[in-house]
Image: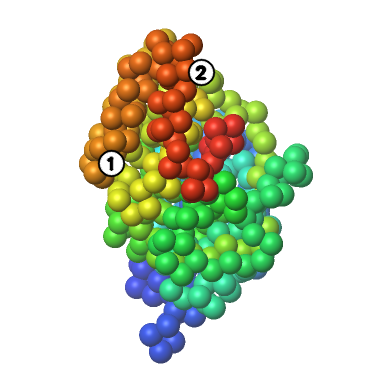
Amino acid sequence: MAIRFCKCLFGSIVKKDTIVKPLVSIIVPIYKVEPYLRRCLDSIINQTYTYLEIILVDDGSPDSCPQLCDEYAAKDKRIVVIHKENGGLSDARNVGTLKAIGNYLYYLDSDDELPPNAIEIMVATLQEQPNAEIIIGKMHCPQNEALYNEQLFNSTHIFENNKDIRSHFFSSENRLPVNACNKLISRKFLLEKNIFFKKGIIHEDNLWMFLVVQSLNKAVCLNHITYIRYLNPGSITTGSSEDEIHHSLGMIFIEIFNKIDSFLFEKQFYHYLLQFRAIHPHMTSSQKILYQNVWDTAVACAQRNNHILLAFALYCHRKFYKILRGHGTGFIIWFLLTKCSQSTSIIKPNTLNVS
């Protein structure tokens, strides 16, 4: 408690009102990752940047992970262990976020690891760009070298305003990644904007990053690998059924269409509309009501932002497309519905981006 109190009192080293050595809180949700946990924790405690708070959130893991967490905490005083009942990945991240006292947060999945200088590279960038609310690095996957080869930029890129940030998030090229991991983000920013992870769904990063992007004013993307991701068959992302994925994405689309604002409306709206059209043919009959709710929310979104013709076209497309598509009329409705999207860079239906 005394150590944590001192950290809270002196959360960063300050020189002439400028933070020169920020405290970084690394938040690691842990559940049934016994084979990978030591690799993950060793990569954290061996970081070249040592001014860390390491928060391990044991989400009621039934294996030996709780004991491993306590073992590491006994050896390294920077480690804070939270044992809690199972509540899912979002809940574990939220608990860690509220517990953290660092100036910046970094989310790390417990079956992945960090390169030795990952945090040092990000903090060095932050010191060069002190007003940046988020620093984003590159990912590397040893099991699939090509998985992240085309992501982001070939050099460090600085986004100086929200319009620039949104333009690159709602884009099919040089798109800002949706993953919550591998981002050094201001804790003050998240708390002031009240941005947390939605509980009870998978692919929650999609909604979380959308909310982050709505409010960001300065971001930096690096051309450095700062995260090593492993494809684990037992993970939530790779082990979920298609039905679970489609249900969660449907819930996410409802949240997003409820929050899309007028700033760069077309770019945002068509981005998510085409993503939704990419998955709705695969939604099961049991998800018919969810599908209708997403579509109705999209119509309401268009109306709320004074796009009345678009709202009408959406309504007609949902009501009559199946009846008229064999006669060409359905195609005309869809063409009118999406013609505005041709002037914007939007994600293609077959490139649905899920974390």
Residue 280: x, y in percent? 46, 22
- Percent position (x, y) of residue 70? 52, 47
Which amino acid lies under the numbered mark 2 shown in the image of this protein? His
Q: Circle 1 is placed at which residue position?
A: 307
> Is 67 or 265 nearer to us in this picture?
265
202 up-or-down from 220: above or below: above
Check disc 2 and report the residue beneath it.
282
> What residue lies at 38% left-to-right and 85% top-to-bottom?
17
Residue at the image point whose x is 39% and y is 75% from the top? 10
Image-based side of 200 in relation to 354, left or right = left
Disc 1 marks a residue whose amino acid type is: His
Nearer the N terminus, badge 1 or badge 2? 2
Give the mark toward the camera: 1 or 2.
1
Secondary element at image label 2: helix
Give the vertical position of 329 relative to 302 (above or below). above
- Label 1 secondary element: loop
Q: Nearer the viewer, residue 129 or 184?
A: 129
Name the quadrant of the N terminus.
bottom left
Looking at the image, is 142 positioned above or below residue 135? above
Crowd band around label 2 with a 10 angstrom C-alpha radius: few (<14), some (14–19), many (20+): few
Point 46% across, 31% down: residue: 335
Determine the image quadrant of residue 36. Answer: top right
Mark 1 crowdedness (10 Å alpha carbons): few <14, some 14-19, many ≥20: some
